[in-house]
Image: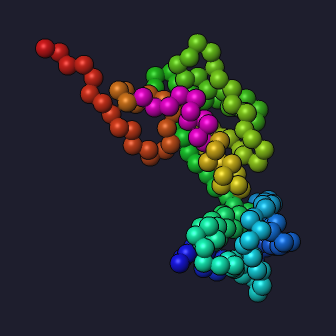
Amino acid sequence: MSRIGNQVIRVPDGVTVTVKGSRVTVKGPKGQLEREFHPAMEIVHEDGELKVNRPSDRRDHRSLHGLTGALLVNMVTGVTEGFEKKLEIVGVGYRAESAGKALRFHVGYSHPITYEPPEGVNLTTESPTVVAVSGTDKEKVGQAAAEIRALRPPEPYKGKGIKYLGEQIRRKAGKTAL
């Protein structure tokens, strides 16, 4: 039994939800999100609440039930509060700087790397070594943060590279002298 799918999603004031078949549009103070869901899932919007109903107890319907509920919660949260991930750049001389909407990273290569964010994602530098990725779509924010981290993943010996703020890097012992 899906506990996530059975939860009722409250729609806050100032947020409008439009359900047309399996397409759901959510508008709020931070923007608008639109998504197509699996046609087997029935999404009901009444009295300021969203409810997801599944047609049967089959395994695939049970998994889609929870997924649909989680995605709807993320859509409502995104247009009201938004999502943010912070990345930390560790290393001597490693830094990031703004270049319009894009960011330019100096992370130990012979050239700087410029990263253009996808539509709906904002990149800001809080300091030369801390980058904030924010937006309304949780999936796009997480993907952009993962792509930035992949530019120079943290290495296990000194911990140099780009990591999520608060991420613990498993460290290895270096060479030992005899």
Q: Is residue 164 visible?
A: yes
**Image: 134 above or below 173:** below
Residue 31 image offset from top left, x and y in percent: 79, 59
Furthest-front residue in this view: 58
Residue 55 image offset from top left, x and y in percent: 69, 78
Magenta span includes 85? no
What colour scheme governs how the chains and residues are painted in the rendered image of this protein? rainbow
| Residue at the spot 54% in from the left edge and 40% down from the top edge | 87
Residue 170 image offset from top left, x and y in percent: 35, 38
Furthest-right residue in this view: 20
Quadrant for the C terminus, please.
top left
**Image: 53 above or below 96:** below
Q: Is residue 90 visible?
A: no
| Pick the front one: 31 or 71 | 71
**Image: 93 above or below 41:** above
Left or right: 92 in relation to 148: left
Residue 122 image offset from top left, x and y in percent: 71, 44
Span colored in magenta: 145-155
Left or right: 96 in relation to 170: right
Splitting the image into 4 quarters, where does residue 148 fall? top right
| Pick the front one: 103 or 45 | 45
Left or right: 144 in relation to 167: right
| Residue at the spot 60% in from the left edge and 78% down from the top edge | 57
Splitting the image into 4 quarters, where does residue 66 fall? bottom right
Furthest-bottom residue in this view: 47
| Residue at the spot 45% in from the left edge and 31% down from the top edge | 154
| Residue at the spot 66% in from the left edge and 64% down from the top edge | 71
